[in-house]
Image (cartoon, rainbow, N blue to C red):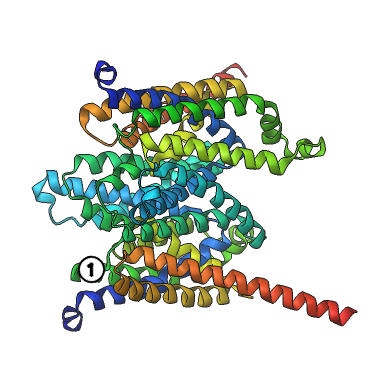
């Protein structure tokens, strides 16, 4: 089944890309979930849509932007949006949690206006929203490879700092960690990973790839390291099988990947909760 | 009824829009004080799943033709709210994971069904981003009926919901059935979402629930004022959005949200100016 993917160029690069994002998205997702920022991933991915729409609009009027991959503008918007979210949190001191819904819904609204102005309600928009099997060209893939390398390197370099900040923010700040800078760095990493992943899974489904494997891994893992291993495992299984299934069934790859991911999550939830009650019963039996 | 039948499509759209501009901020005010605004995003994305399921059902089984996809959307949105509650219990320590899981899961499943259903992209875009032109007489009746039901429920349970929102412990102690009321509240959200879809679209419903109250809460001194100002901002956004989208020939949902965003930005600016002004006056008086 996978042979087809190695045979044709346009499928091959999508396949390689999906292997990379199946690894990268869950890893970043672990930090996102542990830092209680899973909603932020949703907001950032929706802003990426605004950026992409803006880039499409510019491309229609300025030839300079016509050739550019809209994903990069999406990444820029995501970073800008996260700064705006921080700002809104300060404005709504008593209702901080409203910052994300404000950003999320405004982003889609403004995005729709841009798309509408660019006459962009076409099939292309659907692949931006829900992913596409054949969106990655050779040039795109080189960029994907480069960015994956950069993100992995940054994560390795700052692993300790991010770990510290995620689990004990106060202690981390007291011991002199530049919280603002680390947070900003993390946002940039997230924005880049969203931009990379969306080419395969689509904007509306990127956050699924960051939260679902982690949510499943959480039920199994007994340490932070195990959480990484399980999430990557679940991420890779769902991305690869989803992509192959999407190609053969002719459906949107993002949807297929998420559906498989949800099934895995349900199975794991079923097993762990059954196991939990068994354990409890067992304990009661010995007592 | 005859009066309604004589309306042009634009008038139908405006009536439905005004109704939404009134109802959505009312629910939004409750969501704001309960710190649950994000749930509207989660449920609206699940409504998409319901609608795609409805469309697919109609296509595959001819005897189900009488089903309006909006009904299945409503049903799914209710099921979604139950699932969110359930997931909150499963992830006790990471309860904020519940909404992203449901949100992305909902979009994922609908992406697959959209690919399977042989419906034109334009129709999906209408569901996603709303279109004032496609509001049929049936849709208007649906909106009026659902809106009336929502307002009736809100009127009947106003006191209970208020006390549950502001002091859930006190409410429980005074014998208010919290569980049943929470379900009624989910029903309200689901009703408002399903009545708004035809005008603003699924991806933008959250904006009409969130943005007006976010602007209102900057100025309001009481809950009543949040509701009244919220309705004013909501209606202004709807009217401004419909008029500008008609003249600029841009998607209605997008323009409504954009007007809402501009109003909110204006509100934040005015609030900051007022703060600066009042603090400088205070300094003068103390000096």
Quarter of the image with the N terminus of chain A is top left
Q: Which residue is drawn at 51% across and 43% down?
A: A41
Question: Along the line of sight, which residue is nearer the eye, B167 or A23?
Answer: A23
Above or below, comparing residue A12 to residue B22 in the picture: above
User: In the drawing, does residue A171 fall left or right of residue B38?
Assistant: right
Q: What element carries label 1?
A: helix
Residue at the spot of label 1: B133
Quarter of the image with the C terminus of chain A is top right
Residue B89 can be seen, yes or no: no
On the image, the x and y values in percent for residue A130 come to 33, 41
Q: Residue at x 55, y 32 (%)?
A: A28
Question: Along the line of sight, which residue is nearer the eye, A215 or A77?
Answer: A77
Residue A97, picture quadrant: bottom right
On the image, the x and y values in percent for residue B72 come to 26, 52
Q: Which residue is drawn at 39% across and 59% down?
A: B204
Residue B268, picture quadrant: bottom right
Above or below, comparing residue B258 to residue B106 in the picture: below
């Amino acid at each position: 089944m996978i042979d087809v993917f190695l045979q044709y160029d346009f499928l091959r690069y999508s396949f390689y890309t999906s292997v990379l994002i199946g690894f990268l998205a869950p890893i970043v997702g672990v930090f996102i979930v542990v830092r209680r920022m899973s909603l932020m991933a949703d907001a950032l991915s929706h802003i990426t849509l605004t950026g992409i729409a803006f880039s499409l609009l510019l491309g229609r009027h300025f030839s300079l932007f016509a050739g550019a991959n809209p994903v990069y503008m999406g990444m820029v918007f995501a970073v800008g949006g996260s700064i705006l979210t921080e700002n809104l949190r300060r404005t709504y001191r008593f209702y901080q949690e409203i910052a994300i819904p404000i950003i999320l819904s405004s982003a889609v609204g403004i995005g729709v206006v841009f798309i509408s102005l660019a006459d962009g309600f076409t099939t292309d928009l659907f692949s931006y929203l829900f992913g596409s099997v054949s969106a990655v060209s050779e040039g795109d893939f080189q960029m994907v490879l480069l960015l994956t390398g950069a993100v992995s390197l940054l994560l390795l370099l700052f692993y300790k700092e991010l770990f510290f900040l995620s689990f004990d923010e106060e202690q981390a700040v007291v011991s002199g960690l530049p919280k603002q800078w680390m947070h900003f760095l993390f946002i940039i990493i997230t924005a880049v990973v969203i931009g990379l992943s969306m080419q395969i899974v689509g904007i509306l489904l990127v956050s699924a790839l960051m939260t679902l494997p982690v949510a499943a891994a959480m039920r199994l893992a007994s340490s932070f390291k195990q959480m990484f291993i399980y999430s990557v495992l679940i991420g890779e299984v769902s991305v690869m099988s989803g992509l192959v299934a999407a190609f053969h069934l002719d459906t949107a790859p993002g949807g297929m990947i998420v559906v498989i991911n949800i099934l895995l999550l349900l199975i794991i939830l079923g097993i762990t909760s059954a196991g939990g009650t068994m354990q409890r019963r067992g304990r009661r039996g010995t007592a | 009824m005859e009066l309604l039948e004589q309306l042009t499509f634009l008038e139908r759209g405006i009536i439905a829009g005004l109704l939404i501009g009134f109802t959505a901020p009312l629910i939004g005010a409750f969501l704001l004080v309960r710190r649950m605004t994000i749930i509207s995003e989660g449920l609206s994305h699940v409504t998409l799943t319901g609608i795609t399921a409805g469309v697919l059902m109609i296509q595959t089984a001819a005897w189900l033709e009488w089903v309006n996809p909006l009904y299945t959307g409503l049903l799914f949105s209710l099921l979604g709210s139950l699932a969110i509650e359930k997931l909150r219990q499963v992830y006790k320590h990471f309860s904020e994971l519940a909404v992203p899981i449901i949100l992305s899961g909902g979009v994922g499943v609908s992406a697959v069904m959209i690919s399977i259903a042989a419906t034109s992209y334009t129709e999906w875009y209408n569901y996603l981003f709303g279109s004032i032109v496609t509001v049929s007489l049936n849709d208007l009746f649906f909106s009026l009926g659902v809106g009336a039901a929502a307002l009736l429920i809100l009127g009947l349970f106003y006191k209970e919901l208020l006390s549950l929102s502001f002091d859930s412990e006190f409410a429980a102690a005074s014998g208010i059935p919290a569980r049943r009321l929470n379900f009624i509240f989910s029903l309200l959200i689901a009703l408002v979402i399903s009545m708004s879809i035809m005008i603003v679209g699924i991806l933008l419903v959250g904006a009409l629930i969130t943005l007006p109250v976010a602007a209102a809460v900057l100025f309001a001194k009481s809950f009543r004022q949040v509701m009244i100002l919220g309705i004013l901002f909501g209606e202004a956004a709807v009217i401004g959005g419909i008029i500008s989208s008609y003249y600029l020939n841009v998607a209605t949902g997008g323009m409504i949200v954009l007007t809402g965003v501009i109003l909110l930005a204006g509100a934040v600016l005015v609030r900051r100016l007022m703060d600066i002004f009042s603090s400088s006056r205070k300094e003068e008086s103390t000096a």
